[in-house]
Image (spheres, grey):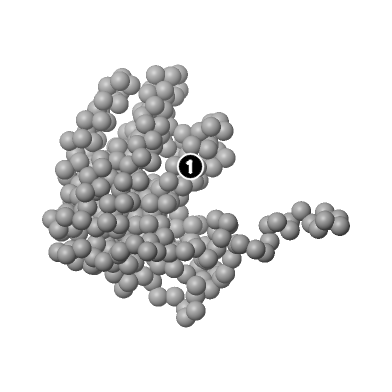
Amino acid sequence: MSDEHGTIFDGLIGGDSSQWAFGTGFEDPLAGVDTTVPDGVVGADLAAYCLMLGDDALVMAQRLSEWCSRAPDLEEDIALANMALDLLGQARLLLTRAAAADPGIVPVLPAGSPVPGEDALAFFREAGEFRNVRLAEVANGDFAHVVVRLLLFSVARLALLERLRASTDQVLAAVAAKGVKEVAYHRDWAGRWFLTLAQGTDESRRRLLTALDALWPYQNELVSLHPVESRVAEAGAGVDPRSLRGEVDAVLDQVLAVSGVDRPDRAPLAGIGGRTGRDGMHTEALSRMLAEMQAVARAHPGGRW
């Protein structure tokens, strides 16, 4: 469509391309921020810790984004997409922080590839190099499944972020301060829907209980200690996840009680040889998810968009 005034696309091409939410022209999200590793903190440990928290957010964001256009109604569809964007924003900052703390963790790409550290970490690592908890990677089920997963995840992440605001690392402290507001909404959204499904129809309750039974064994990994977390917490930059257990249990027990749902009697999901998601030991679901998520970047590693 065109006339003497030009085409309807004229306003979309040329000029300032920074408006677009894709491509390789993003500014460094930590530009102007002091990324010096705090005294007493080992850079490699801080980077590994940021990968853990960043991968949790990235993988959960991907799973939530898969609900786009599939939620029960438009309002919840938008809510899930916005929560995915919240977590994607956290992931971007955390992966960038990881790369700044220890540049050696960033995958080496062909010379001239215009890929910043955050994107290289997201799109050019194999499944065994990811450090997310396994709860985040489990393939999506029905709507009850996403409600239960988000409740378990957000209750623990909110408790973590609240404490992480006191981190000696100013980047982590800033990410946590912003993330608290975002994840508080995620937790409340999931809690309201948990109650709605539990007190709804026989079918909605059945689906909720099925999802809770399947996902509960993964919950313990969120409040279990990894050696990296121990060292970073002792140095004042991180949080010992075991300190979250009391608060996490209290919140979950409150939601369960109000909903008339018994606490599941399920043992925690065991690691393999003692190794869990924090060690790079994952379910097959993560590899399948990454194959889809990373396909375009890997096909065109030097592409400019």
Q: How many marks?
A: 1
Residue 135, percent from left and from top? 33, 45
Residue at x 68%, y 61% (from the top left corner): 13
At 41% from the left edge and 23% from the top edge, which residue is drawn? 196
Residue at point 40%, 67% (across, down): 117
Residue 23, image quadrant: bottom right
| Quarter occupied by the N terminus | bottom right
Q: Mark 1, residues whose alpha carbon is within 10 Å: few (<14), some, or many (≥20)? A: some
| Residue 11 picture quarter | bottom right
Percent x, y of residue 130? 34, 60
Position in image of residue 297 (x %, y %): 51, 65
Farthest-out residue, right:
4
Query: Left or right: 262 with respect to 26?
Result: left
Compared across the picture, whether 70 is left or right of 231 comes to: right
Q: Residue furthest bottom?
A: 111
Q: Residue at x 35, y 46 (%)?
A: 178
User: Is there any visible trace of residue 224 in the rendered image?
Assistant: no
Q: Amino acid at mark 1?
A: Asn
> Secondary structure under badge 1?
helix
Quadrant in the picture for the C terminus: bottom right
Q: Nearer the viewer, residue 226 or 45?
A: 45
In this figure, which residue is indicated by the disc labeled 1?
82
Is 188 above or below relative to 16? above
Q: Nearer the viewer, residue 248 or 43?
A: 43
Q: Is residue 79 above or below residue 270?
A: above
Q: Quadrant of residue 109?
A: bottom left
Q: Nearer the viewer, residue 182 or 54?
A: 182
Q: Is residue 7 visible?
A: yes
